[in-house]
Amino acid sequence: MKGQKLNRPLAHQRMRVGSLIKLRSEYEERYIILHKHTFPGVLERIRKSNIRNYSIYLRKGILFSYYDYIGENLDRDVAEIGEDPVTRDWWKLTDPMQEPLETRKEGEWWADMDEIFHWKGINKPSENCRRSAFTARLLEGGEKSMIESLKIAYPVLAETADWKDIRSFSVFHKNGSLYSYVEFLDWEPVEGIQGLQQSLKAEDELDWAPMKEVFHTD
């Protein structure tokens, strides 16, 4: 689990949440090892609070987290996580390893992100489902126009490109960078992701860099 208090976006069903925080360089190895041995009680509390697909990725000192919320009362579910004694013990270990962004909103630990695109593709279970995350830096000074262009271009790309094996694809924005989370089926791990990156680059001309998965709940 990401070591933090979960942010509290506006509650509605089946929402997607992305957030960012810095990881102190001296704790990187310890943070990764710790998340490979997450307290079982922490994982159980996350599931009881209707959070799924909780993933954390790392690149160059930045942690990007993604999760799906499937409940009906996010305020209540997040509050119950914060009151859980096992989770609070977990935060005592993980919080000192993190450094919140200067641009976070008041009351946030991890900084909430804006989702600029979501593609819901095939919806079928598969043992071959894989996950990946990428990040790309927007050109300084052109962030707003680029984001508006992508909001128009991505839906067209999703309909015309060969995305038949994509189950879910979301793109978030924060601090002049884009972060994407993708779930895909039946691809070769390398060829499939390269194909997705190529189709994106043809549309947005951005250099998408892969992120390292640190944690996943399911």
Image: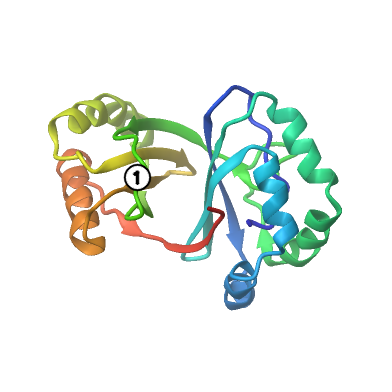
Residue 80, percent from left and from top? 80, 39
Q: Is residue 124 above or below residue 40?
A: above
* Res 40 → quadrant: bottom right
* Res 191 → quadrant: bottom left
Task: Please count the marks in the image.
Answer: 1
Horizontal side, residue 212 vs residue 163: left or right: right
Closer to the camera in the image, 144 or 108: 108
Residue count near mark 1 (Cα–Cα under 10 Å), binned few <14, some 14–19, many ≥20: many
Q: Determine the residue positioned at 29% across, 35% down.
A: 122
| Secondary element type, mark 1 | loop
Q: Determine the residue positioned at 43% across, 43% down.
A: 176
Closer to the camera in the image, 136 or 197: 197
Q: Determine the residue positioned at 13% across, 31% down.
A: 160
Closer to the camera in the image, 207 or 66: 66
Circle 1 residue: 138
Residue 187, percent from left and from top? 22, 55
Q: Is residue 175 visible?
A: yes
Horizontal side, residue 27 vs residue 134: left or right: right
Q: Determine the residue positioned at 61% across, 41% down.
A: 51
Residue 93, percent from left and from top? 76, 67
Closer to the camera in the image, 154 or 165: 165
Q: Amino acid at mark 1?
A: Leu
